[in-house]
Amino acid sequence: MKEIRLGLDGMSFDDLAAIARDGACVQLTMKSEERIAEAQKLVKKWVQEGRVIYGITTGFGALSDVMISKTDICQLQKNILMSHAAGVGEPLDEETVRAIMALRIKDFARGNSGVRLETVQQLIALLNHGVYPVIPEKGSVGASGDLAPLAHLSLVLIGLGEAFFMGERIAGSVALKRSGLASLELEAGEGLALVNGTQVMTAIGGLAVYDADRLSKITDVAAAMTLEVLMGSGTEFDPMIHHLRPHPGQAVAADNMQRITQKSEIITSHKDCSRIQDAYTLRCSPQVHGASKDVINFVKGVVETEMNSSTNNPLIFPEKHMFLLGGNFHGQPVAIAMDSLCMAVSELANISERRIERLVNPQLSGLPAFLVRDGGLNSGFMIAQYTAASLVSENKILSHPACVDSIPTSANKEDHVSFGTISARKSRDILRNSEKVIAIELLCGAQALDLFTNMKPGKGTLAAYRFIREKVPHLDEDRVLSRDIEAIVQLIKSGKLLETVERTIGRLS
């Protein structure tokens, strides 16, 4: 089993995906253990001195002016977890919960939260033993961190709440017992530290942008395949065009599609035809895909920074023997990035759906109606295009930004919130919708390519086509298409389709 060591910095998207999806285990670096211990010593010292420290010796939010006696400090930590566990809705899926746990550990690994090493090790043990707290997906406003969902996560540490263990939903206390772990009693400041942070929005958003990066490359493959079967030109990929408008993503998309269609006999066969130029969905595909790629890269930068940040309040600075109150828990950077991702991925699906329409419409394609023989008796890919239209329309609704909204909370003490977790959940849903749209375009493109029996497509197109045909046969007559769509979605999500193309033409950007 792969083990990933989490320390002060350096956590990557590959690390996040390995922990969330591949079951990689987690450990702290020695430097992190030392810093965590140093910060905790300071907290204990300050409590003994009777210092006034928000959330450690005081109440929370609008109750921050209420002093808590030393005898009640431990009860305060338990109370914050119970009172803040007010989430609702369906529980987050296992891979998302693993990602949240990993990022919560990563934040603590920086040594600025004041929690005990024992508490962090308990969270690591839950993750490594396969105990996944039940976390309702709704209830966070994305400022003061993801309070409600992180409270549900943390309840299991103290033997409360619920968890999934070995596929069964059970009480947190039972999950601890079955996995051989004992419940903790939290000490000063730990309850607040456990719920203060942006790890829920960052985990959901991190996995979404990781998948969006791959999907943008697969969209280049789908567009190249469609261009070939619609007898489009390869001229629009010429680097001289993109040199004159040097947006990075545009040049990358053009280069990808030029390499995918390299040595295409289909494109070469009609280079002297009478068509002047292609429709925008073909001719402008580098520009549209490229704009989305640039946004995806921006979002990756924001999320990677957030993954390697300290988002608690107060923040402990062990080397300076001090603490500061601030607002690193505010999710605005992630919120704006995730809303941007919503639009970027929606546009990949939007242009793909328009290419699907061109593929199935005989007046636009010159191909058999809905790409099937015996039209009338067979409907072919007619309703697959309906599905794509439905998904992109849903995406348009989901693309309305959440980050521009704000509702004051905590008696107006917390008077501006980010709604970053809503932004992240929207981006996840749009990503899933868009994977299905691109899958439909690939199915239609492969179906159309079956007609070109005497000419080979480009090297990358051919590799994708052959791999698709290993999983989904040609549609001779009507069958249940949802299974075919899901099969291609799985090829996209697993990364196997992209790997197949890249083995033939090199790495896509």
Image (tube, helix red, strand yellow):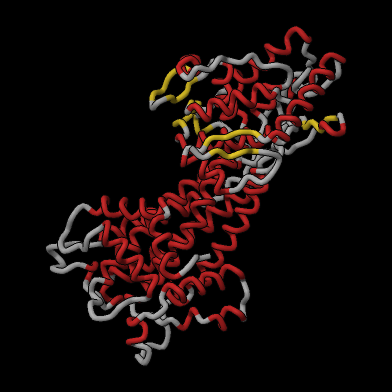
78 left or right of 55 in image:
left
333 left or right of 281 in image:
right
37 left or right of 282 in image:
right
Q: Quadrant of residue 219?
A: bottom left
Residue 160: percent from left, percent from top: 53, 16
User: 25 above or below 485?
Assistant: above
Q: How many marks?
A: 0
Q: Nearer the viewer, residue 212 or 280?
A: 212
Residue 442: percent from left, percent from top: 34, 63
Q: Quadrant of residue 93?
A: top left
Q: Nearer the viewer, residue 451 or 82?
A: 451
Q: Nearer the viewer, residue 436 or 49?
A: 49
User: 142 above or below 504?
Assistant: above
**Residue at x 21%, y 63% (from the top left corner):** 474
* Residue farthest along the top direction in this orientation: 71
**Residue at x 53%, y 58% (from the top left corner):** 344
**Residue at x 53%, y 56% (from the top left corner):** 343
135 left or right of 191 in image:
left
Residue 143: in sight, yes or no? no
Residue 106: percent from left, percent from top: 64, 36
Residue 36: in sight, yes or no? yes
Residue 306: percent from left, percent from top: 66, 44
